[in-house]
Amino acid sequence: MTRRCILSTALILATVFGCKSAPPTFEEPPPAEELYETGLKQLQGRKIWGILPFVNHSKAIETFQSIVDNYPYSDYAVLAELKIADGYFADHKYEEALSYYRDFSDLHPQHPEVPYTIWRSALCHEKRKKGPNRDQTAVREAVIYLDRLLLNFPYSDHAVEGEELWRSLRQQLADHILRIGDFYRKRKENESAAERYRMLLNEYPGLGFDEETLYKLGLSYWDMNRKSEAEKIFQSIIQNYAGTKYAQKAEKRIAKEAD
């Protein structure tokens, strides 16, 4: 009985230690090209019940990240970096997307997709913009990227829509400054108001605010008893914007002073 117990114990120990000493097995990842195609399909998503679109962005990002991790020196790794950014953008995670777009253009400055990453970086900021009465940091950051796009890649596929967005965002910035100027005028803080109006005219000319801003700048000078400067502004409006609403108002102001 004792011998049988000893043999049984030895067999158990051999089995246990034998299992522990067995080398771990690792599953080879699919080829980079296959992973890339899988990631693209995941980004396209599917339809639930054949109607509702559904995209598992996290899963797609995970697939593209596996290319970067397992095939870091392949061409697919570079493309995967870009698709990771696109995945975050599509998932409305603009801060993460911006980080990847920015890194891509920094790490691969000669890559043909750099204009695209600059355009998308601008959109990441634009998507987080607030109304004209709120902080305009996101709008200004978007304009910086659009300036870069239009200056360095004026003939890229995104230049036309980039210029349209550039103008729209600059109009919002101009509107923001105009509102601040109007705020100060209502409080009769005419010097501060005039400073904002001059800023708008200097930094955002030709966006449709010039005539109104000039008139309000003239009013600010008028209320500060700088009437000769105000009259020069009103005369400029009459000459350059003849027949418009603010030209008529300027004429009335001058006529009022003459009386």
Image (tube, rainbow, N blue to C red):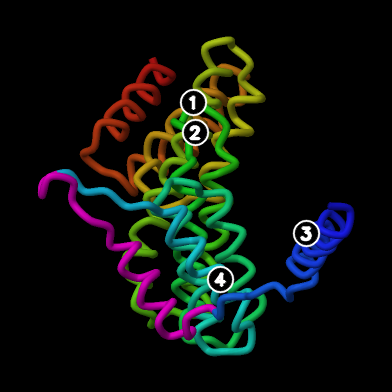
Q: Which residue does the image show at 50% across and 70% down from the upper left?
A: 64
Front label number (1 vs 4): 4
Q: Secondary structure at mark 1?
A: loop
Q: Residue furthest top?
A: 187
Tell which of 86 and 11 is nearer to you: 11
How far separated are the C-alphas under marks 4 and 3?
A: 40 Å
Front label number (3 vs 2): 3
Residue 66's disc number = 4
- Which amino acid, by three-letter code, is at mark 4? Ser
Front label number (1 vs 2): 1
Residue bearing the label numbered 1: 133
How far separated are the C-alphas under marks 1 and 3?
A: 77 Å
- Which amino acid, by three-letter code, is at mark 2? His
Front label number (1 vs 3): 3
- Please state the extent of the stretch shown in magenta in the rendering: 29-51
Mark 1 or mark 4: whose residue is earlier in sequence: 4
- Compared with 200, 112 (above or below) is below
Residue bearing the label numbered 2: 176
